[in-house]
Image (cartoon, grey):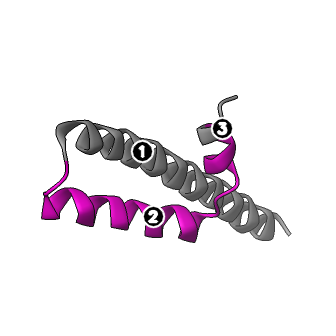
Amino acid sequence: MTDEQDDLGALGYEEARDELLEVVRTLEQGGVTLEESLALWERGEKLAQLCESWLEGARRRLDKAVGGSEEE
């Protein structure tokens, strides 16, 4: 596992979402080099995947909770 993956794994949903928003703002403003833009884009992709993973986990937990309460 790389240092970046370790760093991403330590982020909660809100932190990852906030960082993703900042990446998007920076890319939209421009003024960064092509290399910086590519690095930001890659970071944004990883953050988006992490957010999606958090949301999918929350959906599974909700589905399980709702399904469990219906069985009772």
Instruction: Give the class, few, some or many, for how many residues have Cα within 10 Å of label 1's Cα (few <14, many ≥20).
Output: some
Q: Closer to the camera: disc 3 or disc 1?
A: 3
The spot of residue 28 in percent (x, y) is: 16, 61
Q: How far is disc 3 from disc 1 in space, using C-alphas?
A: 13 Å
Which of disc 2 and disc 3 is earlier in sequence? 3
Q: Judge by depth and name the residue closer to the eye, 68 or 33.
A: 33
> Residue 43 got which mark?
1
* Residue furthest right in the image: 72
Q: How far is disc 1 from disc 2 in space, using C-alphas?
A: 9 Å
Instruction: Give the class, few, some or many, for how many residues have Cα within 10 Å of label 2's Cα (few <14, many ≥20).
Output: some
Type of residue at label 1?
A: Arg
Q: Is residue 22 magenta?
A: yes
> Residue 19 got which mark?
2
**Element carrying mark 1:** helix
Type of residue at label 2?
A: Glu
The spot of residue 72 in percent (x, y) is: 86, 69
Instruction: Indicate the quadrant containing the N terminus: top left, top right, bottom left or bottom right.
Output: top right
Which of disc 1 and disc 3 is earlier in sequence? 3
Q: Judge by depth and name the residue closer to the eye, 55 or 70.
A: 55
- State left or right for residue 49 relative to residue 8: left
Instruction: Look at 60% across and 56% down and name the residue there.
Output: 54
User: Magenta span covers which residues?
Assistant: 5-32
Quadrant in which residue 34 is drawn? top left
Check disc 3 and report the residue beneath it: 3
Which of disc 2 and disc 1 is earlier in sequence? 2
Q: Judge by depth and name the residue closer to the eye, 39 or 58.
A: 39
Type of residue at label 3?
A: Asp
CB within 8 Å, label 1 to label 2: yes
